[in-house]
Structures are given as structure tokens and as C-alpha cells.
Image (spheres, helix red, strand yellow):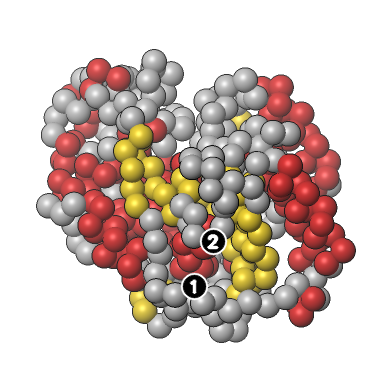
Amino acid sequence: MKLMNSQLKKIILLLSILAVTSFSCKGESKNNFIYIPCGTLYFPPSGTSEWKTKTPDSLGWDTSAIPELLTLLEDNGTRGFIVLKNGYIVMEEYFGNNILDTAPFDMNTMWYWASAGKTLTTFVIGKAVEDGYLSISDKTSDYLGTGWTSLTAEQEELITVRHQLTMTTGLDDEVANSHSTLPADLVYKADAGTRWAYHNGPYTLLEQVFENASGLVFNDYFNSSLRDKIGMDGFWFWDGDDHVYFSTPRSMARFGLLILNNGVWKNNVIIQHSEFLDDMVNTSQSLNLSYGYLWWLNGKESFMAPETQAVFPVSLVPNAPDDMVCAIGRDGQYLSIVPSKNLVIVRMGEEPTAVPVPFLFLDDIWEKLAPIIQ
């Protein structure tokens, strides 16, 4: 059935959105989705390249299937690929050169997260909620003032921070520049909460919401509350209207390990296991079942994709475990977390040549990876 679903999804998506897409031990949870990892997770120290490893053989993985996976990755523009099991590096591969400066790509190379970095913004908002700076039920206009859109006052008042986190602001994503945060480009399409659309402009404004709510600088708060506490490297860079995060693949893996362990880094609570942490990796609205708070969710009955209003009657990544959650960015920047298996998977690189639709290439990766880890 999974194979059938995978083939069906690829046919549907290639016909419908290829031309437009740019892009174990359960803990208590309202949806039984958050897991408490079994056993003790390993957390690498900060300020060093030290990171303990385990071999695929030692875990009983099928190593005969690894070359086929690596060929798929290399042939499709992958630059960095990491698999963590219980926090240990089991696979770490680098391919080709960094297209930004033609230097060899290795563990020290910085690469862009693209929209996978949206999940970092989710963390900042969640931490700001925990610190008492705002509530996601607050109206966005409480922090951006009236007239931050071209809507009527009544229409604008309906939009909350939660709508920004869930891509349900109702603002028109089909404007000439959907990345713009200018009021002239933020126009009415539907009442907030009644339409899901992948829209970068309202998302980017979450940073301004945070700064106005807290009086703090977004980058500084991000560094002090997350990056520096778990030993990540990286920086935010403005690319036109988009604020994009750059880091090494290992830093993306560190963030995934933090989320796998429910916001706790070793014995240090980075963000409380709160209602927000639970909600961000569960279905956040009834329109796109596969979307949380800027996180993509697997194993749901259907999903919606960027730049289309179609609802596809299959799970997001049929070859992957149903409990996987993902940060997904343009050109195939992936951070996949599988709580039931204590796995974190990172892929960074250029646009896949075989399957340019990000969801489909992630499914191709899992088609090769699943037999290895089972």
C-alpha cells in the first residue's frame, strides 16, 4: 500500500504542481505524537568537532543497500547528508564542491536552510511565548500596528500570530511578490483561518512581531536562547525579502536532536515541553492536515503543497515512517525527525536533478533509506 501511495502521489504531483512549485516510548500528548526517546540520547559537546559515531553494522542495518542510497544523493546535487541514531552519527557523507566558492564541501561548510529555517523562527516564537512576551492568540496588529496590510480594519483584526505560524492568514499568496512584507502586497483573499496557502510574506513578519513584542533583536535572541546553548554555528542573512539561515549540516542535525528530545539538550531545558511544543508538531488546522507550526507532518490522510489549493489524498512522504516531522526548504534542504526510531536525517544541497519537487525527492531518499534502517 505504501508503494502504491508513493507512486500515486508522484503522478498526481508531477501533473499538478511541477510547473509551479518553488520550493516506542510514548510520552503524554494530546495526539500521542510527541515521543520520549527510549534510552539515553548522546549529545555532542560544543566548541569542538567531536561527535561520537556508531557504525551501521553495529546497529544491524543492511549495509548492502547503502551504495544505492549514496548514488541517489550524489547524482541529485546533494552536498551534505547525515543520519543520527540516538544522537550518534551513523552516516555522514559530503559530495562535490560548494557552489558559492567552489571549495570542497565538508563538515565545516556553511549552506542555506531555505524554508527549512522557518522551524527556527517557530522556536523563537515558542520561546517568546514561554518567556511571556506574547501569546500566539494575540492579534498581529497588536505588534505591527493597524495598516500593516491593505485589508480593511475588520479583516485585519482577524489575523493572529497563530495564523502566521500556520499559513492561514487569508492573505493572497498569488500577488506578484509573495515574499514581500509591504502592505501593498498583503491583500485580502479570504478571512483568516479559512484558507491555507504557503505564503512567505506573513511568515517573515513574525520576526517583526517578536521584536516589537519583546523589545529585543531577533538575531541576538535566537543566538542566546538557541544557537549558542546547543553548540550550533550559523548566521541569518537577508536575501531580498527573505531572511535565510546558513549553517553547517551538523548544526542542522543538532537542532533536530533538540526537537527529538522535546526541547531538552542533555540536561539543559532549552524550551519547556509545553502546549506550544506539542502543538507545533501536530496538525494545526483542518485545511492542511500535514502542517503544524511551520513544520511538515507525515502520516496524515492528505496534504497541501505550496502554490496550489489542491488537496492530495496521500501522506506527505509515503516511504517514511508515519511519525516523521520535517523542516523542508527549497532545493531539497531537509531536516527529518523520526521519534519512534530516534532518528534525525539531514540533507543539504542543490536542486535535485531527477525530481525537482522537494516532497518527491525526500520520498525517493526514504525509499532507499527505509530498507537500510529496518
Residue 203 appears in which quarter of the rendering? top left
Residue 125 x, y percent position in the rendering? 30, 53
Residue 8: image location, x then y, percent: 78, 34
Within 10 Å of the Cα at label 2, are there few (<14), some (14-19), or many (20+) other Cα atoms?
some
Q: Nearer the viewer, residue 116 or 278?
A: 116
Residue 76 seen in this snapshot: yes
Give the image location of residue 228, x and y in percent: 32, 67
Q: Give the residue type at disc 2.
A: Met
**Apparent side of residue 271 relative to residue 311 in the rendered image (left or right):** left
At horizontal 48% and vertical 42% (from top left) the residue drawn is: 101
Provide residue 294's location: percent of width, then percent of height. Answer: 44, 46
Position of residue 363 in the picture relative to residue 132 (left or right): right
- What is the secondary structure assignment of the residue under circle 2? loop
Q: Secondary structure at mark 1?
A: loop
Residue 256 appears anywhere in the view: no
User: Given the current orientation, which residue lies at the most extreme right position?
Assistant: 64
Label tally: 2
Q: Could you tell me if the residues under marks 1 and 2 are in contact, i.e. CB atoms within 8 Å?
A: yes
User: Disc 1 residue type?
Assistant: Ser
First of labels 1, 2 by sequence position: 1
Along the line of sight, the residue nearer the viewer: 158 or 262: 262
User: Residue shown at 26%/44% (left/top)?
Assistant: 207
What is the quadrant of the C terminus in the image? bottom right
Task: Tell me the crowding category of disc 1: few under 14, some 14 to 19, or many 20 or more residues within 10 angstroms, Cα based.
Answer: few
> Which residue matches tag 1?
49
Q: Which residue is mark 2?
A: 107
Q: CA distance from mark 1 to mark 2?
A: 9 Å
- Location of residue 35 by image quarter: bottom right
Compared to 48, does 138 lie above or below? above
Query: Residue at the location (76% across, 80% down)?
Result: 58
User: Compared with residue 304, is residue 280 higher up or lower down, i.e. above or below?
Assistant: below
